[in-house]
Image (cartoon, helix red, strand yellow):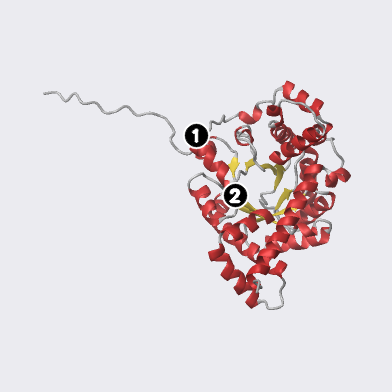
Amino acid sequence: MTNTLETPATTDVDTRPVTLQAASQTVTALWNDSADPRELSTAINEYGAVGATCNPVIAYTCIKQDPETWEPRIREIAAENPTAGESWIGWKAVEELSVAAAAQLLPAFEASGGRNGRLSMQTDPRFHRDADALVEQAVRFSQLAPNVIVKIPATKVGIAAIEEAAYRGVSINATVSFTVPQVVAVGEAIERALDRRAADGLEDQEFGHVVTLMAGRFDDWLKTVVQREHVMIDPGYLEWAGVAAVKNAYRIFQARGFRSRVLVAAFRNALQWSEFQGGDLVVSPPFQWSKDINDNAFPFRPDAIDDEVPAHVLDALRAATPEFARGYDEDGMTIDEFDRFGATVTTLRQFLDADAKLDALVRDIVLPAA
């Protein structure tokens, strides 16, 4: 008797997580916007993340949410350094958190020759007015692990510090950065630093420099402005502002051959992941965003970076507020205007507030109330 059972037909359906599919089909790199060790492990092993970040808000949240690990460790740090204040103790904990995250990323760092596998560690926001202090701390942070990349704000003082730190061999990630004028100014500063290194015969290597554009915080600022000024605009258009800024910045970086990549952070909607696929840049969503993208099988297009933002959306954003043009146009602001841009002020204050909260958390651990 002939066996009539047939082997089931095979399919070419890719059942891997969406972010892993994107990583295999594009040059776009996925980083994780958190240094939490448990989240980072999942992001690396399940979602394909090849980088991560830490900042004062992230560090404070990680330490606060893991008291079993950090309360005894902070007491130990205090005991080992009996003259240290709360701020020094807190930043020592941040360093240890960052070094542990860097170790998780070391395989990706080695596999990519230093282009990825980076842990972004942010300089103390209390130094935002002191270029020398930013450079000194950046150099020290860069020596904590081979794959640390240091975040310095894209302010007037910060950009001067970025150039000097990059010249000294620090891998750079600009932060407190929301606009095309800021990221272009940072890209130019890194180019000057690399050219100075070459002229002085210093080592040429893969530094993995990236320049963050916090797309969602640009959106946030425009929403604040139109609400404050009672401007009526289709709210859906406001979700495109950060996307438009990133696409414009990416075009400029590609056209000028900058030796740094645009990094997209501060996610507010899924477009800030899907619209950049195919670009030689970094997308760095918070862990929950990566989880949601994969859980919902949110689609991506391998060449989405080349799609233009609809002209009528750009026109509506320009008509709604001049703040859009300030952030979108390459010449929308001078470097002297960066520090007073609304998103810059808001974010710097948030980072400074997180520093104060970390100080208070350490105080409560080291010197609990009677």
Identify the residue at horizontal 73%, vertical 58% (top origin). 123
Q: Is residue 93 above or below residue 308?
A: below
Above or below — where is 184 with respect to 74?
above
Precedes in sequence: disc 2 or disc 1: 2
- Distance (Cα) linking label 2 and label 1: 22 Å
> Residue 297: which numbered mark, if any?
1
Residue 365 percent across, percent down from the top left: 63, 69
User: Which image quadrant is residue 269 in?
Assistant: top right
Q: Residue furthest top?
A: 312
Does the rendering let one see residue 13? yes
Q: Quadrant of residue 330?
A: top right
Can you say whether 31 is above or below 279 in the image? below
Whole-percent x, y for residue 194 in the image: 76, 50
> Residue at the location (77% across, 28% down)?
317
Residue type at the position of mark 1: Ala
Query: Are the residues tagged 2 and 1 within 8 Å (C-beta)?
Result: no
Say which mark, if any, is on residue 51: 2
Residue drawn at (63%, 77%) of the image? 79
Q: What element carries label 1?
A: loop
Q: How crowded is mark 1: few (under 14 residues within 10 Å), some or many (20 or more)?
A: some
Residue 201: in sight, yes or no?
Answer: no
Residue 37 horizontal/vertical position (percent): 54, 56
